[in-house]
Amino acid sequence: MSDTFDALKKREEALLCRTYGRYPLAVKSALGARLYDFDGREYIDLLAGIAVTNVGHCRSELADVVAEQARKLVHVSNLFYQEEQLVLAEKLLATNHFTKVFFCNSGAEANEAAIKIARRYAQRVKGRDAGEIITFTGAFHGRTLATVAATGQAKFQDGFAPIPTGFRQVEWGNLEALAEAMGPQTAGVLVEIVQGEGGVRPMTAEFAKGIQKLCRERGVLFMVDEIQTGLCRTGKFWAFQNYGLEPDVATSAKALANGLPMGAMMTTDEVARGFEPGSHATTFGAGATMSAVAAKVIDIMRDEKLDERAAELGEYAMGLFRSIGERHPGTIAEVRGMGLMIGVVLAFPGQEIWKALMAKGFVLNLTQERVLRLVPPLVIAREDIDAFAAALEELLAAHTV
């Protein structure tokens, strides 16, 4: 490591709360699908800020929008009408079947809004004494107390008791368990079409459609967490569109403003009756600058057909990785994913492989100890995927010796 890196690390340890185990990399600048450290070394970015910079780092068009909007209007609060919010809402809702949106600042806040509207819709609109939210094992829905409760994993709840009640988990993929868990107390079912933190696990079409069917039969809201999967990541604009679903609620964040803080909870006119003035709010959500940037992000995604590109390039990449596994038995247990959300499941703990890949100039992350998770910018070049595949094969070939 360079002296600059060591100095930055020392400054951080003196200044910041220790909530992250940092990667051994200090990023000075970025462009497209490239990161650059303080020594000028170049890295191919296969992480995209954890599925955030879908249209690439430091797009000049977005920088222009920020500069122009910052000289016009930045923040006045949600006590006022703002055209920028409405332009964004129209463009966002045009990508799906929803008709109403609540804007906020993050994915956790979007999921909080979904939880709150599910409960309030059940209690104030439908007159049901219902508030329980059902989620699935392996889920990840955020870091607030409510979304940690929804996530249901002990490692995220450790030391934060008492954890809020009103959440129940059932086994991923088990429709019978879901049917048994649903009752008069159930207000909503919250799911990820592809579990990200859980190891890049896509739902089967049968499971996804079965959840929607059960929710319709029981009068329970079907809610989809699209924080990581939305905005063209999985080969459709929204992951639920891969299975022809029409959820009652969907949440979005991460890639919505390509790195600036923005979240959204989308729903229907009917379910939106659950909110009224004063029932929910946010100070910063959909400020003029964030809204203008997010609207431009959606334009770029549609103009460049990034959903189609993710589908095509994702299929190509997964084919490459499966071929590597076939050539080197005992190294890759499975390749799974949807679009450019890919998990390469190693047959052994992957920490050393992950470290070696970073040393070779490839930035990605490792989840569930064995899953190399790839969520690159959707504008990444095919040649970059080829270069990563070659580096991975070289490491796995050496591992088998």
Image (tube, helix red, strand yellow):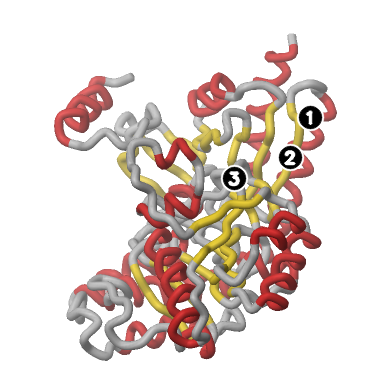
Provide the secondary structure element on which disc 3 rests: loop
Amino acid type, label 1? Gly
| Label pair 3/1, CB-CB below 8 angstroms | no
Res 116 quadrant in image: bottom left
Say if 309 sits above or below 127 in the image: above
| Label pair 2/3, CB-CB below 8 angstroms | no
**Disc ID at residue 101:** none
Q: CA distance from mark 2 to mark 3?
A: 18 Å
**Disc ID at residue 325:** 1
**Which quarter shows the C terminus?**
top right
Residue at the disc numbered 3: 138
Provide the secondary structure element on which disc 1 rests: helix
**Residue at 20% from the left image edge and 37% from the top image edge:** 16
| Label pair 1/2, CB-CB below 8 angstroms | yes
Residue 185's spot in the image, x, y percent? 55, 68
**Residue at 74% from the left image edge and 52% from the top image edge:** 174
**Which quarter shows the N terminus?**
top left
Mark 2 is surrounded, within 10 Å at the Cα level, by few (under 14), some (14 to 19) or many (20 or more) other residues, namely many
Mark 2 or 3, closer to the camera: 3
Among numbered discs 2 and 3, the one appearing first in the sequence: 3
Residue 2's spot in the image, x, y percent? 29, 21
Q: CA distance from mark 1 to mark 2?
A: 9 Å
Q: Is residue 92 visible?
A: no
Mark 3 or 1, closer to the camera: 3
Amino acid type, label 3? Gly
